[in-house]
Image (spheres, coloured by chain):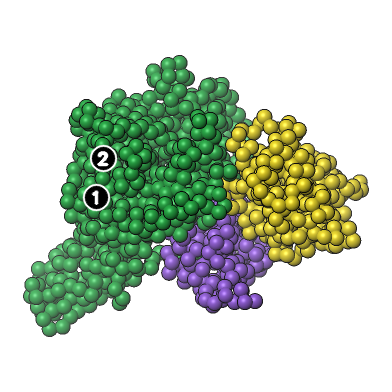
Chain colours: A green, B purple, C yellow
């Protein structure tokens, strides 16, 4: 067996099935007698439903909210101060609050026939003024999204840590920037999908769902359908991308599960691309005003920040409205040694789809704010942008470092990451090139971003538990079982949909037991197999799920060793488990021989054999507050001031995610995140007109990065183990997506600086770049 | 309506509504689910299959329009040396994560390998513009295709072009 | 996202297709490559009662070179032009333009006639054909007519075609010397619909220049003043850019579209036209 433990660039075990078209996604599953569900969508952003009528003769195949007996609205109840709840109805009740909201469900023998039914459903609407701008939404006299509210504010959070007044008094430089990160959609290649089927014998409903979180989906379906968890089995097979979107429970899945029970036939719903772009949860939609107070050298003393999020019409489950804006204050100091932060986080309702966390959660916006602030400060102080960062970054000797917001940054050398990025991008050469000018007249710009990524958290201050969110990630289970032929089956509660858990968890098992990863099967995504665990998000799976796998494998060593010792006629203390065998003073036995003894040769077992046998059940709880990866991004762009086009010429990333289980897959996560971040920075925007009509309804209008959008990024790894996790691992799933909007904006603004132009809004489309240049010209 | 086509070398007869897309026919009627429908308006490329040897969108073609044609899906490359090499390098270069775009990527990669032996990275990027991937950031895919071209056509493939 | 129901016919000859189209005027839609109609069917933006599949008609695949023109059958796909299987009467421009249309998988199926007939303002072929002075052969069961490409589209997705008519072929005039040309396209990324698309063709040793502008929010327009400015240019300098800007502003005003453009729209169109002109002059 080749080396295959922690740290190896093992090729993925899961690739084989995908390369031969043998992946199995929800839409690939068909059950006998299956019906197909589709949804009638509101054409209005805001309207009262005056009347409804079902197609004559097909009444039994069409369902409005009132038909869904026993179904409750989707509800989340965090303890944010003053939080106003906004039940998310499975199908609209009384009012529609965004264009694309589900109003009715139709089922038929094929999706096309079900869509035919939609044509014949009549709904009369009374259109209302739409709330489309978060700033105007809070003005008196604005129309209200929810009639029973007195305004359009879900919640307002205030945050004040450290001696802010002292910081402002001591400051020599005060710089302020306003940043806007517009609305996007996560756009996994596979949309949502579900297939529900009722087993009359067991009275169990099996629901295939394209989800990141099988057990939470089971819990949510149970709550909102009003049926016991024991009657629900959720299977999440292969999932075609998720990026946070597929953590929240959609009303469609609730309705489809209800329909399968009600109709006694399997029912499948495959979200189409229009539905994803228009009717599903969106993401981002942030606005910041950030002010930094610094001393003469540019050392930041305090930060004052307003963070707003237009979070749409409803508060979804399990992640309520408020967590996007609410994530900002305690992260606003970024990776810098800042002793005072004052912030206000506003969560505003509008007639748009709900906003849900997308790769990076709020942190791409937060990073955009604190990193454009750093560049503004560099301008004020008159030094290089990387220099101002080096003056402020938390230093290695301060680790572990408690931020003013009480986060415990566990380990690393933040300045060294920045220095390496500076070296890789070659600041001196870029500056010389800028002075020379480009033959084609374009302007060159250099930008940096430094940030940390809080991973695998949930418990602790400023997190899920502190906010009273119903689903708190933390404890993650794993079961490891040696089979009768000496191979390994590992069950986990985290879900893999591209992350490569089947490979990296096998590597972890191999590291501990010495077993060949090819002899390890990872099972997940089925609540009848993995009965607990909260799934995959928050860059938590490797740390939490992997930690659980490591713990289970370590536990499994004891019964393996004991049986092995008995077979070797040695004492327990004399044997060692390694390389898939048990070694004693005089020879060794294979796992297969040990498995054989336990499963069908009890006469060979020691008298004191553990009756649990060769199964180890373990739980692993990551440290409160999680572990912190960090990164420095550097980018060189060329800005065409005639067309407004931005081209990325060079991109470097220095990343430290602690001990890497598989550097190849770490790089895959970083580059994939970078691609999303480039989309965020330059291309992707869900645009609405003033009446709330979506203008990005197809992929001709919603621009997803293509192969030409992504440069040949250069990545350098640092590897500072966390003192708080198995092997010193940290999460890395979102990091790549956090830095690009900030780094690219800084680079564009560096290029535009001689023109006096600045752009602080994503995506930085050609028109926005040109508008910034024109605004600068008109100011002069 | 009756449709007869050769699907992965097998004569296949189906009875479909005229509105049924080739993609739906392949997936729902023939249960070859390796071909994925990602957008159904021709942009994402996940549904790309070979029709008479050329990559085309199976979501934009009616099944009845494919009558009499040869259709090749991701399930239909057994023993094909070019696809074997492409698959090997896709794995080698970590060119896939969730796998949803992969069948379409492979069809496009196969077309590049056969049609553009001299393609450099810039050309590969252009040729991939009709296939969206949301996971990998494309670099592994570009690497894999570049290595496949080197393997199939020789590492001197670009210099030979210059000489010719 | 599945189409509404329709009947389907695949006529075996052009005459049969024209007869079917005539008999079903107003309720039938022609399907050639389906790369424009397909999405509209799937989104139920188009709900014809009958789809007439002309994708295999040999009469529409013909390509011939006459003394005065290159005649390209309406059913020729973009990839055949891209790969040079069709002679290029425009000194390489047809190949370049074809290669930039959407994606290879779309070009393998989408046809030149279908693209023209669909009349999407962001489509690549209409401004090219206008700039080249091409004519379209229009056929119906009633007879044939020939009209200049410049007179074909009447608006967004609207043309002079009667419900019983189709494009049979495109006739591109052949000069003794292939024209000098420039083509520039600005889009969010490769394969996307053009924000701006400019084609400049210079004939007769620079005496005459045709400039055409199009884009996703602008149906193709002929830029006469800009063309005149370009015709006089012998070599490129920054003065020429200014001359083109003056010409473009005059043209936009003349077409009555100046007010609908933001300064940024105008800037993008200007850059696009200027770069196409520069390429044509340098060629």
Residue most extreme to the top = A141
Depicted A104 relative to depicted C142: above or below: above
Chain of residue at mark 1: A
Chain of residue at mark 2: A
> Left or right: A361 with respect to B57?
left
The residue drawn where x is 62% and y is 62% is B55
Crowdedness near tag 2: few (<14), some (14–19) or many (≥20) residues, C-alpha within 10 Å? some
Depicted A210 relative to depicted B69: above or below: above
| C-alpha gap between disc 1 and disc 2 | 31 Å
Pinpoint residue A211: horizontal percent, then vertical percent: 40, 48
Pinpoint residue A615: horizontal percent, then vertical percent: 22, 63
Dot 1 and dot 2 residues touching (CB under 8 Å): no
Give a yes or no on whether discs 1 and 2 share a subunit.
yes
> Left or right: C246 with respect to A470?
right
Name which quarter of the figure residue A701 lies in.
top right
The residue drawn where x is 62% and y is 77% is B163
Residue A726 in view in this figure: yes
Task: Give me the disc on residue A627.
Answer: 1
Crowdedness near tag 1: few (<14), some (14–19) or many (≥20) residues, C-alpha within 10 Å? many
Q: Earlier in the sequence, mark 1 or mark 2?
A: 2
Pinpoint residue A219: horizontal percent, then vertical percent: 33, 42
The residue drawn where x is 51% and y is 24% is A130
Secondary structure beneath label 1: strand
Name which quarter of the figure residue B56 lies in.
bottom right
> Left or right: A583 with respect to A526?
left
- Of residues C263 and A39, the one drawn nearer to the viewer in this rendering: C263
> Mark 2 — residue?
A297
Task: Give me the disc on residue A293.
Answer: none
Depicted A436 relative to depicted C153: above or below: below
The residue drawn where x is 76% and y is 33% is C254
Name which quarter of the figure residue A60 lies in.
top right
Count of number-bearing discs: 2
């Amino acid at each position: 067996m080749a080396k295959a433990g922690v740290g190896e660039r093992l090729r993925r075990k899961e690739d084989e099935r995908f390369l031969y078209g043998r992946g199995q996604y929800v839409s690939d599953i068909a059950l006998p007698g299956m019906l197909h569900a589709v949804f009638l969508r509101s054409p209005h952003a805001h309207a009262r439903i005056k009347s409804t009528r079902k197609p004559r003769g097909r009444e039994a195949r069409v369902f409005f909210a009132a038909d869904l007996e026993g179904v409750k609205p989707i509800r989340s109840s965090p303890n944010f101060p003053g939080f106003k709840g906004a039940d998310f109805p499975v199908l609209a009740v009384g009012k529609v609050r965004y264009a694309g909201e589900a109003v009715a469900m139709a089922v038929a023998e094929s999706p096309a026939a079900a869509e035919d039914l939609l044509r014949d459903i009549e709904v009369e609407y009374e259109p209302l003024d739409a709330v489309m701008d978060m700033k105007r939404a809070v003005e008196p006299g604005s129309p209200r999204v929810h009639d029973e509210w007195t305004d359009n504010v879900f919640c307002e959070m205030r945050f004040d840590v450290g001696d802010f007044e002292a910081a402002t008094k001591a400051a020599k430089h005060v710089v302020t920037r306003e940043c806007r990160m517009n609305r996007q959609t996560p756009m996994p290649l596979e949309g949502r999908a579900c297939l529900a089927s009722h087993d009359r014998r067991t009275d169990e409903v099996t629901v295939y769902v394209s989800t990141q979180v099988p057990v939470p989906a089971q819990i949510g379906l149970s709550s909102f359908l009003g049926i016991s968890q024991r009657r629900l089995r959720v299977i999440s097979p292969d999932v075609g991308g998720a990026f946070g979107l597929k953590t929240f429970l959609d009303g469609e899945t609730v309705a489809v599960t209800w329909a399968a029970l009600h109709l006694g036939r399997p029912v499948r719903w495959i979200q189409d691309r229009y539905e994803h772009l228009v009717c599903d949860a969106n993401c981002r939609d942030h606005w910041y005003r950030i002010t930094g107070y610094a001393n003469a050298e540019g050392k930041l003393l305090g930060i004052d920040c307003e963070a707003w999020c237009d979070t749409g019409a409803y508060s979804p489950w399990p992640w309520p409205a408020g967590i996007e804006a609410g994530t900002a204050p305690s992260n606003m100091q970024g990776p810098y040694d800042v002793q005072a932060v004052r912030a206000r986080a506003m969560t505003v309702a509008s007639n748009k789809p709900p906003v849900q966390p997308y790769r990076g959660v709020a942190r791409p916006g937060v990073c955009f704010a604190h990193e454009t602030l750093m560049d503004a400060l560099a301008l004020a102080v008159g030094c290089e942008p990387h220099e101002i960062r080096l003056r402020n970054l938390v230093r290695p000797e301060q680790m572990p470092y408690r931020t003013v917001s009480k986060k415990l940054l566990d380990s690393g050398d933040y300045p060294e990451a920045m220095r390496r990025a500076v070296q890789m991008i070659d600041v001196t050469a870029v500056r010389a090139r800028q002075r020379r000018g480009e033959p084609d007249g374009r302007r060159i710009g250099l930008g940096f971003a430094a940030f940390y990524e809080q991973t695998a958290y949930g418990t602790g201050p400023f997190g899920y538990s502190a906010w009273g969110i119903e689903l708190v990630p933390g404890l993650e289970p794993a079961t490891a079982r040696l089979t009768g032929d000496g191979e390994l089956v590992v069950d986990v509660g985290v879900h893999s949909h591209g992350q490569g858990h089947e490979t990296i968890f096998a590597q972890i098992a191999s590291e501990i037991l010495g077993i060949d990863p090819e002899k390890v099967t990872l099972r997940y995504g089925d609540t009848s197999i993995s009965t607990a665990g909260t799934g995959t998000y928050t860059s938590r799976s490797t740390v939490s799920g992997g930690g659980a796998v490591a713990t289970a494998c370590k536990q499994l060593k004891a019964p393996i060793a004991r049986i092995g010792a008995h077979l070797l006629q040695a004492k327990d203390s004399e044997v060692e488990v390694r390389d898939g065998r048990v070694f004693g003073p005089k020879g060794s036995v294979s796992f297969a021989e040990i498995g054989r003894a336990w499963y069908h040769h009890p006469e060979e077992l020691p008298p004191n054999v553990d009756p649990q046998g060769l199964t180890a059940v373990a739980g692993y709880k990551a440290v409160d507050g999680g572990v912190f990866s960090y990164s420095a991004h550097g980018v060189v762009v060329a800005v065409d001031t005639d067309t407004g086009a931005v081209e990325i010429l060079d991109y470097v990333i220095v990343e430290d995610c602690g001990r890497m289980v598989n550097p190849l897959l770490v790089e895959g996560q970083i580059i994939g995140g970078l691609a999303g971040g480039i989309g965020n920075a330059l291309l992707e925007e869900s645009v609405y007109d003033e009446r709330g009509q979506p203008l990005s309804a197809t992929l001709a209008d919603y621009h997803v990065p293509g192969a030409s959008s992504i440069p040949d990024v250069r990545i350098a790894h640092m590897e500072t183990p966390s003192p708080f996790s198995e092997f010193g691992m940290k999460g890395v799933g979102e990091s790549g997506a956090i830095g690009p909007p900030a780094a690219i904006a800084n680079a564009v603004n560096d290029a535009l600086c001689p023109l006096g132009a600045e752009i602080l809004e994503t995506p930085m489309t050609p028109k926005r770049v040109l508008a910034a240049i024109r605004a600068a010209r008109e100011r002069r | 309506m009756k449709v007869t086509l050769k699907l992965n070398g097998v004569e296949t007869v189906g009875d479909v509504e005229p509105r049924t897309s080739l993609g739906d026919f392949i997936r729902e009627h023939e249960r070859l689910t390796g071909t994925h429908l990602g957008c159904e308006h021709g942009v994402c490329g996940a549904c790309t299959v070979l029709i008479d040897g050329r990559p085309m969108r199976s979501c934009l073609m009616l099944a009845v329009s494919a009558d009499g044609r040869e259709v090749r899906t991701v399930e239909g490359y057994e023993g094909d040396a070019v696809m074997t090499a492409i698959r090997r390098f896709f794995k080698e270069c970590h060119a896939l994560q969730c796998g949803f775009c992969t069948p379409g990527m492979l069809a496009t990669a196969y077309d590049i390998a056969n049609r553009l032996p001299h393609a450099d990275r810039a050309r590969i990027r252009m040729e991939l513009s009709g296939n969206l991937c949301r996971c990998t950031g494309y670099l592994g895919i570009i690497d894999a295709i570049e290595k496949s071209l080197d393997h199939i056509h020789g590492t001197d493939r670009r210099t030979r072009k210059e000489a010719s | 996202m599945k189409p509404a129901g329709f009947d389907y016919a695949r006529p075996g000859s052009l005459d049969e297709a024209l007869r079917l189209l005539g008999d079903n005027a107003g309720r039938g839609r022609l399907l050639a490559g389906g790369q424009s109609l397909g999405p509209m069917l799937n989104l139920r933006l188009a709900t014809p009662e009958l789809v007439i599949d002309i994708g295999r008609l040999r009469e529409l695949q013909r390509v011939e070179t006459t003394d005065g023109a290159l005649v390209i059958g309406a059913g020729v796909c973009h990839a055949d032009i891209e790969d040079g299987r069709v002679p290029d009467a425009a000194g390489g421009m047809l190949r370049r333009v074809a290669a930039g249309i959407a994606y290879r998988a779309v070009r393998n199926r989408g046809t030149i006639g279908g693209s023209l007939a669909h009349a999407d303002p962001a489509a690549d072929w209409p401004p090219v054909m206008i700039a080249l002075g091409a004519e379209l052969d229009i056929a119906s069961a009633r007879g044939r007519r020939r009209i200049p490409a410049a007179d074909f589209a009447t608006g967004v997705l609207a043309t002079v075609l009667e419900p019983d008519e189709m494009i049979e072929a495109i006739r591109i005039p052949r000069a003794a010397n292939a024209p000098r040309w420039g083509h520039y396209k600005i889009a969010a990324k490769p394969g996307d619909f053009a924000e701006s698309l400019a084609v400049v063709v210079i004939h007769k040793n620079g005496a005459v220049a045709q400039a055409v502008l199009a884009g996703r929010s602008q149906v193709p327009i002929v830029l006469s003043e800009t063309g005149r400015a370009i015709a006089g240019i012998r070599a490129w300098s920054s003065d020429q850019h200014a001359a083109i800007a003056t010409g473009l502003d005059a043209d936009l005003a003349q077409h009555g579209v100046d007010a609908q453009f933001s300064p940024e729209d105008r800037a993008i169109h200007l850059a696009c036209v200027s770069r196409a002109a520069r390429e044509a002059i340098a060629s």
